[in-house]
Amino acid sequence: LSAAAGAVRPFVGPGRVLAGAGAVAGVGSELHAGGADPKQGAVAVVADRAVLELRLVDPVRASIEAAGFDVELSAPVDGEPTADSVSALLASISGGPFAAVVAVGGGSALDVGKLLSLSLENDLDLSAGLAVAAEVVPGPPVLAIPTTAGTGAEATAVAMLWHAGLKRMFVHAQLVPRMAVLDAELVSGLPPAITAASGMDAISHAVESLLSTFRTPLTEAAAGHALAALARSLPSAYREAGADERFDTLVGAYQAGLALNAQVVLGHSIAYAIGARTGLPHGLTCAMALPYCLAHSRPAAEPQIAKMAELVCGTSDPRDFLRWVVGMNETMSIPASLAEVGIEADALPAMAQEVLERYPRPNHPVEIELQALEQLLARFLRGELDDAWAEAGIGAPVGSTGRGIGR
Ligand SMILES: NC(=O)c1ccc[n+]([C@@H]2O[C@H](COP(=O)([O-])OP(=O)(O)OC[C@H]3O[C@@H](n4cnc5c(N)ncnc54)[C@H](O)[C@@H]3O)[C@@H](O)[C@H]2O)c1
């Protein structure tokens, strides 16, 4: 894969990553290695509700305590957190001081852990989001342990909350976890539906980052490895996973998280609009939107899509890649149309408006125009992917540098 010529962009990620079988046993020593000291205070542990019930947090806690830290466990995190639920959770924890925050769970718990750390030192407005350029003081270092594979939140500068029907984005370098621990044991029992949704979320990160005009050689390398690893492992992880496949999905999701340095494109914007109307899991909505995102991108991104086909299909036909994505969704019972998830035609104009205004994508390879977007959503409503693909040319390519986008 070759990067677009364009602006020089930063590439951020965790400073230390411990990956492999039994890695959770090393959480305590990683905290020390990452600069945390028991003299600075306790370790705040933020964990997903199911993960607590499944006792997946027990070995994490044991490792932290064995390393000499006290542990303060927050209230459990539920999926798809809201600004209100996180405010309540923050109120459930003492003011510290904390030597570190350890977050254990899917993207929801990792995002909450990241926001907890920053909230300890800053008066964040959780209903508003956070801009890249905001002046914030670093919180205690975060060690992130994903139990889905996954959002890649353990690698990103992002956290997300729902508020008043919209996704609120927190994007800041201070949200990148300082440490991450990847242990396949924590995802070995992931139910098929969660494996599918979170695995396709990771694939959509890799694919959309490759479509993004913000891509760089580093994001392309991460996305290429992620796509290959997930293509190899996700179908078998979905059926009955062996440890090797699970580990591949975890590493693939992490690398796809690194690829998010290039940001996502139109697919995620459509996914948020579906999620707001249906309450469906984030990964599932991303998986649904991905084929239509590819179709919309095609006028400017055929070479990239052809390279994705080379990676996973062994051909250079962009259409083969589209078929591969559709096949993955079908195999994992992911709905193929908006109508299947209860969205009706009269919802589309507001959806299109929301996508354009609330989740703009200056890095999408084709200019997103309202009328063309409504047409795309109408195709999506009825599952008319072939027509959407054939209608390539519905927007103007924004050019290879990704600059000068008229919005
Ligand atoms: N920060 C980022 O960079 C980033 C990127 C993408 C998505 N996200 C956010 O992440 C969230 C979605 O995260 P997700 O897809 O990981 O889902 P999730 O964290 O919401 O978890 C989904 C479900 O899986 C359960 N679960 C988690 N681990 C489990 C395990 N090991 N075994 C059994 N059940 C388990 C949870 O209890 C929950 O019910 C969304 O809010 C999305 O906005 C963040």
Image (cartoon, rainbow, N blue to C red):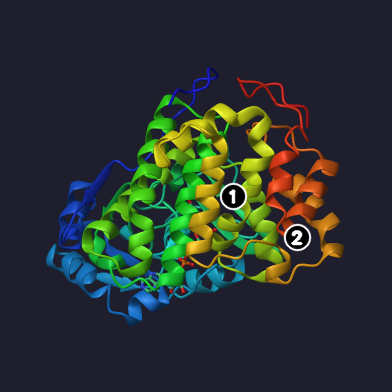
Q: Is residue 337 left or right of residue 100?
A: right
Q: Is mark 1 within 8 Å of ligand 1?
A: no
Quadrant position of the C terminus in the picture: top right
Q: Is 234 rendered above or below residue 218?
A: below
Q: What residue do we see at 17% from left, 71% from top? A: 62
Q: Is residue 369 left or right of residue 30?
A: right
Mark 2 sits on what residue?
Answer: 382
Residue type at mark 1? Answer: Leu
Q: Is 243 rendered above or below residue 179?
A: below
Q: Secondary structure at mark 1?
A: helix
Q: What residue do we see at 29% from left, 49% from top? A: 179
Few, some or many C-alpha atoms within 10 Å of disc 2 (few <14, some 14-19, many ≥20)? Answer: some
Mark 1 sits on what residue?
Answer: 290
Q: Is residue 176 left or right of residue 165?
A: left
Q: Secondary structure at mark 2?
A: helix
Upstream in the sequence, badge 1 or badge 2?
1
Residue 233, position as x, y percentages in the image: 33, 54
Return the residue nearer the eye: 150 or 246: 246
Q: What residue do we see at 20% from left, 65% from top? A: 64
Q: CA distance from mark 1 to mark 2?
A: 15 Å
Q: Quadrant of residue 102?
A: bottom left
**Residue 302, labelled with which disc?**
none
Residue 79, position as x, y percentages in the image: 50, 71
Residue 242, position as x, y percentages in the image: 24, 64
Q: Is residue 215 left or right of residue 155?
A: right
Q: Is 65 rendered above or below residue 101?
A: below
Q: What residue do we see at 41% from left, 57% from top? A: 150
Q: Is label 1 in contact with label 2 (beta carbons under 8 Å)?
A: no
Residue type at mark 2? Answer: Arg
